Image (cartoon, grey):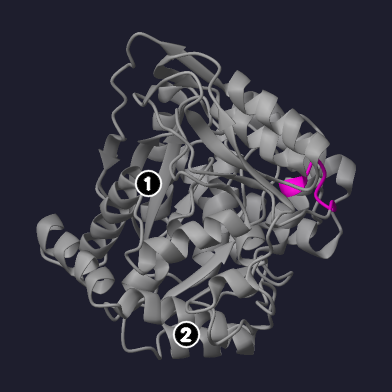
Amino acid sequence: MTFLPQEIIAKKRDRLALSAEEIGQLMRGMADGSVSPAQVGAFAMAVYLNGMSDDETVALTLEMRDSGRVLDWSDLDGPAIDKHSTGGIGDNVSLMLAPMLAALGCYVPMISGRGLGHSGGTLDKLDSIPGYRSVVDNETFRRAVREAGSAIVGQTGDLAPADGVLYGIRDVTGTVESLPLIVASILSKKLAAGLNALVLDVKTGNGAFMPELDRSHALAKAMVAVANGAGIKTAALVTDMNEPLATAAGNAVEIRNAIDFLTCDHRDPRLLEVTLALGELLLVTAGRAPDAATARASLIGTLDSGAAVDRFARMVTALGGPHDLIDCVATYLPAAPVVRDVAAENAGVVQAIDVRGLGMTVVALGGGRTRPGDSIDHSVGFDRLLGLGAKVERGTPLGRIHARNEAEAENGALRLRMAYALGPTAPDNPLVVERLAPEAP
């Protein structure tokens, strides 16, 4: 029978369920170009307006996965596992968690992304390291995973190519926020990575992609259900993004923050807790630990013994970075010409933080993009950021700015002060809001 994309699009337009075969025809057509951009946009809008059932979303995810290469790690002597975050400010968990898991005999083939909008990207942070190759061929990727136990790289064109086509159209047709399309886009790439288990960190709060808790919950629930329905053991946490997760926000500053974490020089408490909470959930989900307490003790052990920082160093070297990065971090990471404290103009308690505004300030400093092709300055950003509940006097530093020149430092300092609201007290701000186990409906 002749494939007519318009007939499938019309069916979804009319709120009828699509079969797996119909969805597969569309995804294959997107990958090979036989479905036009106009038809891709019409399909995205039909899904945005009318939604998809869980069965349809599972089929969409699997067909996106199968539109390109699917990696196979069955030759390894441990499970292939990963985590995914929906993004935020100071969220550099991957930089610590991947080597911690690798030190426990797991393999972490992490396909990550770059920042866009207010949210920072893991690949941009790693690009701060001289020589580090965040885009590599499949052979190099596999070798790095075998040698270091973890490798954090970008998506190649042969992994879930239908998703690349569909996402590009969604970005310009007002359909990015469609829940089924978000779920399928995220999970198709994780499924294409050949994982045995996955943990999701879905952010909620003013710095999250979905600020409202009910929407964050719906996204987490949908991804857990679809991922497990597609055959990958998956659990999720909904975590807070009403304040930066780390005390650093930027690229090189977050790499330095991560190395300090791994070497035990400094660990932000919120960052430590989310890293451990995600790690213990993933180890239990993957069957590598009998319970959360045992998993947590093992993860802490990789930090205390130095095994985790060793795995991080091996990953950096395997992907082209300097072999002595850990010992000579100040030599290798780019430094901004202007670095200075940003003082509070009033006294009080940090009552609220405009996290999205803080992220956009990093972008304004040159540390992020407003368009996908923009170049960025890896040296700029903030560190020593205060969190909610911190008591300040007039003149107390709210954070430290790293800028390219005095004018940008002044503007960034003004924006940072505007992002902080002081008052008599701070609200209770639970870090882990919700846990969704693999068997969640």
Circle 1 residue: 224
Q: Is 312 on the left-hand or right-hand side of 263?
A: right
Q: Which labelled disc corresponds to residue 314?
A: 2
Q: Residue at x 46, y 90 (%)?
A: 147
Dot 2 alpha-carbon crowd within 10 angstroms: few under 14, some 14 to 19, many 20 or more: many
Q: Residue at x 73, y 40 (%)?
A: 363
Please say whether residue 15 is one of the residues in the magenta stretch: no
In what element is the residue under mark 2? helix
> Where does the image place residue 209, in percent across and percent down from the top left?
56, 33
Instruction: Tell me if I can see residue 318 in this picture.
Output: yes
Say which amino acid is labelled 2. Answer: Arg
Is the C-beta separation of discs 1 and 2 under 8 Å?
Answer: no
Mark 1 or mark 2, which has the lower sequence index? 1
In what element is the residue under mark 1? helix
Residue 280, compared with residue 193, is above or below; it is: above
Instruction: Tell me if I can see residue 15 in this picture.
Output: no
Residue closer to the observer: 38 or 414:
414
Magenta span: predominant SS is loop
**Span highlighted in magenta in the image:** 366-374
Dot 1 alpha-carbon crowd within 10 angstroms: few under 14, some 14 to 19, many 20 or more: many
Q: CA distance from mark 1 to mark 2?
A: 32 Å
In this rendering, which labeled residue sits more in front, label 1 or label 2? 2
Say which amino acid is labelled 1. Answer: Val
